[in-house]
C-alpha cells in the first residue's frame, strides 16, 4: 500500500514576449520576432494582427481581441504566463511605439509584478509605421522628427493640439498616427489648421496606407490639400519641415550638409566652416551673434521675436558666461 502523499504540481511561471511584428509582411519581421512566435504556447493580439502572422501560428492557442481591448490583452497575457505558458503578445510596428508594451506594464505593476518576479517579460522591437512608411517614400526622416497620435480616445484634445502647434512651430518633420477613423474625422482638419499657422501651404506631405501590406497605397500631396486625401486608421501621414522636398517621386529632408559643404564642388567646406566642427551658426556662433545684437541695443523682447525663442531663455543665455571652444577640440562625426 502506497502511503506517500502526492503533492500538487505547481507549474513554473511562464513568460510574456511583447512582439513587434513590423509593418505586417513576414519578410520585414526580425528573426527574434519570428523565433518568439515560434516558441510561444499562446499568441494574443488584435484580430487584424493575428491575420498578419497566420502562417506562423498554426497549432497554437490563439486569443483574438478587438481594437479597444488592449487591457484585456495584457490581462490575458499575464494569466497565461502565471499558468506557466510562453505568451507572444503581438503589436504591429514596434510594441513600445503606440503598442502593447505600455498597457502591459501598467497591468503588471497593478498586479504587484516586479522585474524579479518569476514571470519574465521581454520586449522584441520591430519597425514602427514611421520607419516603414518613410522607407517607401524616400528619406523624409533624415533630420529631427517626432510622432503624434491624433486619437483622442485616451488623450484630451487640448493636449494633442498643444503638441501639434509646438512641433509645427519648431519645424519638426512629423508622423501623424491614427489620423482619421469612421468616427474621428475632424482631427486631421484641426491638425492641418494648426500646421498652416507655421508652415507654408506647399509643405510636402506623404500619406501611406497599409505599408508593405496587400492594399498598400502612397499619395504625395501638400499641407493645404492633405485633409482632402483618402486617410484612414491604416494611414500614416508624414508632414515635411521647411526644407523637405519631393523630387522624382521621392520625399527627402536634407540633413544640412549644404549648410557646411559645397555640394556642387565635390563637398569642399564652405568659407568660414570647418569639417567636424559646429556650424558658424551653431551654438557658439549664435551666442556671439546674440551678444553682439544685444550690445548694439536690441532688447531682450526684440531678440526673442527675431530668433523665435522665449524671452526668459534669451535673458538667461546672455547672463550665462561662456567661452569659445578651444582650437584643438576633437572633431565629431555626424553621419
Image (cartoon, helix red, strand yellow):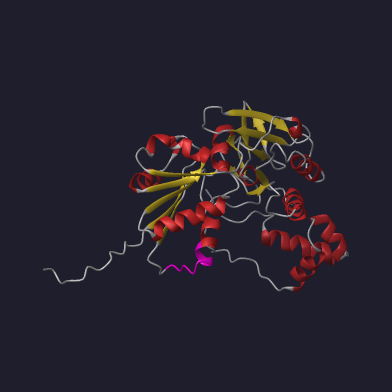
Looking at the image, how many numbered discs can be counted on the residues? 0
Q: Is residue 277 left or right of residue 24?
A: right
Classified by dominant secondary structure, the portion drawn in magenta counts as: loop
**Residue name at image x 74 percent, y 33 percent:** 226
Question: Where does the image place residue 94, in percent across and percent down from the top left?
Answer: 51, 47
Q: Locate residue 251: give its quadrant.
A: top right
Q: Which residues are magenta?
A: 108-115
Query: In the rendered structure, does residue 328 fall within the stretch colored magenta?
Result: no
Residue 89 percent across, percent down from the top left: 46, 49
* Residue farthest toward the front in the current orientation of the protein: 1
User: What residue is shown at x 67% (from left), y 29% (from top)?
Assistant: 220
Direction from residue 76 to residue 256 in the image, left or right: right
State the image coordinates of residue 218 (x, y, percent, origin top left): 62, 29
For the point 70% across and 36% down, the residue is 182
Q: Is residue 263 visible?
A: yes
Residue 261 in percent (x, y) is at 61, 44
State which quadrant residue 252 falls in. top right
Q: Quadrant of the N terminus?
A: bottom left
Does the image show residue 332?
no
Q: Is residue 110 covered in magenta? A: yes
Q: Nearer the viewer, residue 126 or 232?
A: 232
Q: Is residue 294 left or right of residue 255?
A: right
Give 7 or 138, whichever is nearer the viewer. Answer: 7
Between 180 and 331, the one lying in front of the other is 180
Amino acid at each position: 500500500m502506497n502511503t506517500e502523499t502526492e503533492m500538487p504540481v505547481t507549474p513554473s511561471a511562464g513568460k510574456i514576449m511583447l512582439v513587434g511584428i513590423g509593418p505586417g509582411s513576414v519578410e520585414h519581421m526580425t528573426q527574434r520576432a519570428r523565433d518568439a512566435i515560434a516558441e510561444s504556447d499562446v499568441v494574443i493580439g488584435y484580430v487584424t494582427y493575428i491575420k498578419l502572422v497566420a502562417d506562423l501560428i498554426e497549432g497554437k492557442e490563439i486569443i483574438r481581441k478587438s481594437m479597444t481591448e488592449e487591457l484585456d490583452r495584457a490581462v490575458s497575457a499575464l494569466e497565461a504566463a502565471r499558468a506557466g505558458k510562453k505568451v507572444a503578445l503581438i503589436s504591429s510596428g514596434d510594441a513600445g511605439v503606440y503598442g502593447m508594451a505600455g498597457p502591459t506594464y501598467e497591468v503588471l505593476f497593478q498586479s504587484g509584478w516586479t522585474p524579479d518576479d518569476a514571470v519574465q517579460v521581454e520586449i522584441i522591437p520591430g519597425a514602427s509605421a514611421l520607419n516603414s512608411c518613410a522607407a517607401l517614400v524616400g528619406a523624409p526622416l533624415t533630420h529631427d522628427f517626432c510622432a503624434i497620435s491624433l486619437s483622442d480616445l485616451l488623450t484630451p484634445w487640448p493636449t494633442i493640439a498643444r503638441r501639434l502647434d509646438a512641433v509645427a512651430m519648431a519645424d519638426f518633420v512629423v508622423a501623424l498616427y491614427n489620423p482619421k477613423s469612421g468616427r474621428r474625422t475632424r482631427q486631421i482638419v484641426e491638425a492641418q489648421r494648426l500646421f498652416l499657422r507655421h508652415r507654408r501651404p506647399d509643405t510636402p506631405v506623404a500619406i501611406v496606407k497599409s505599408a508593405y501590406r496587400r492594399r498598400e497605397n502612397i499619395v504625395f500631396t501638400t499641407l493645404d490639400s492633405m485633409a482632402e486625401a483618402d486617410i484612414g486608421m491604416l494611414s500614416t501621414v508624414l508632414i515635411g519641415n521647411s526644407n523637405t522636398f519631393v523630387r522624382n517621386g521621392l520625399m527627402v529632408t536634407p540633413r544640412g550638409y549644404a549648410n557646411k559643404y559645397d555640394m556642387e564642388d565635390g563637398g569642399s567646406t564652405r568659407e568660414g566652416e570647418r569639417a567636424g566642427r559646429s556650424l558658424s551658426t551653431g551654438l557658439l556662433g549664435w551666442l556671439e551673434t546674440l551678444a553682439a545684437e544685444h550690445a548694439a541695443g536690441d532688447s531682450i523682447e526684440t531678440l526673442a521675436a527675431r530668433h523665435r525663442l522665449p524671452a526668459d531663455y534669451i535673458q538667461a543665455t546672455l547672463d550665462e558666461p561662456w567661452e569659445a571652444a578651444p582650437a584643438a577640440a576633437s572633431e565629431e562625426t555626424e553621419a
